[in-house]
Image (cartoon, rainbow, N blue to C red):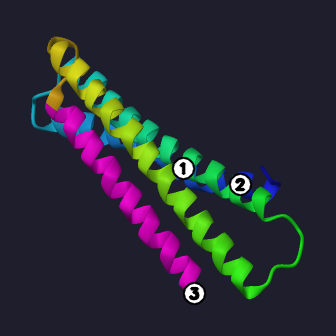
Amino acid sequence: MTETAKKSLLGQILPLVIGALVIPGAIVGVYAIIGRFHWNVITGSLLGALAALANQLILIISVSRAFDKAVKARGEEEMTEEQIAEFTAKANRDMNNSIKLSYAVRLPLLALIILGAALLKPAFDLLALAIAVVAMQFLIMALGFVSNKKKKS
């Protein structure tokens, strides 16, 4: 992985890690304000945020690997227009397959985490867990929106 790619990856991951710490803190704060705080709110919100973070990290890493593989396969030689079109189509197929495989792994993993928390219900507040997962997804969408705005500028 190139140095630029590593910086880009860190730029994607760091806000998510910060969010995975801030979101549970906010959830615990709200629970405390409304008088519903219990220690399992901490564990539930942390588990939810960490599960959503792991979900996104797996996606980022799998797409990054697929992209690196395409760059390596591209090589340095000159290509004709037809070769470029063929290479691009193959790279897009490979990237889509990587995303689909990642989804096939990530979704059951997230479901297993939630199921495990439900089975260990006294240890995890399931509402706090769900709120953390949803809040992390909103954070991921917001970061994507901001990133797209920066690219267009």
- Let me know if residue 143 is in the magenta part: yes
Q: Picture coordinates of residue 84 (x, y %)?
A: 71, 79
Q: Picture coordinates of residue 32 (x, y %)?
A: 18, 32
User: What number is the disc on residue 153?
Assistant: 3
Q: Amino acid at mark 3?
A: Ser
Q: Which residues are magenta?
A: 127-153
144 and 60: which one is in front?
Answer: 60
Q: Amino acid at mark 1?
A: Ile
Residue 21 in view (yes/no): no
Left or right of residue 103: residue 60: right
Q: Earlier in the sequence, mark 1 or mark 2?
A: 1
Left or right of residue 131: residue 90: right
Q: Is residue 73 above or below residue 150?
A: above
Q: Residues within 10 Å of mark 2 (few under 14, many from 20)?
A: some
Tell me the SS state at disc 1.
helix
Residue bearing mark 2: 68
Q: Amino acid at mark 2?
A: Asp
Front: mark 1 or 2: 2
Q: Picture coordinates of residue 142 (x, y %)?
A: 38, 64
Residue bearing mark 1: 60
Q: Residues within 10 Å of mark 3 (few under 14, many from 20)?
A: few
State the predominant SS element of the stretch in magenta. helix
User: What number is the disc on residue 83?
Assistant: none
Q: Earlier in the sequence, mark 3 or mark 2?
A: 2
Q: Picture coordinates of residue 12 (x, y %)?
A: 57, 55
- Let me know if residue 71 is in the magenta part: no
Residue 105 in view (yes/no): yes
54 and 131: which one is in front?
Answer: 54
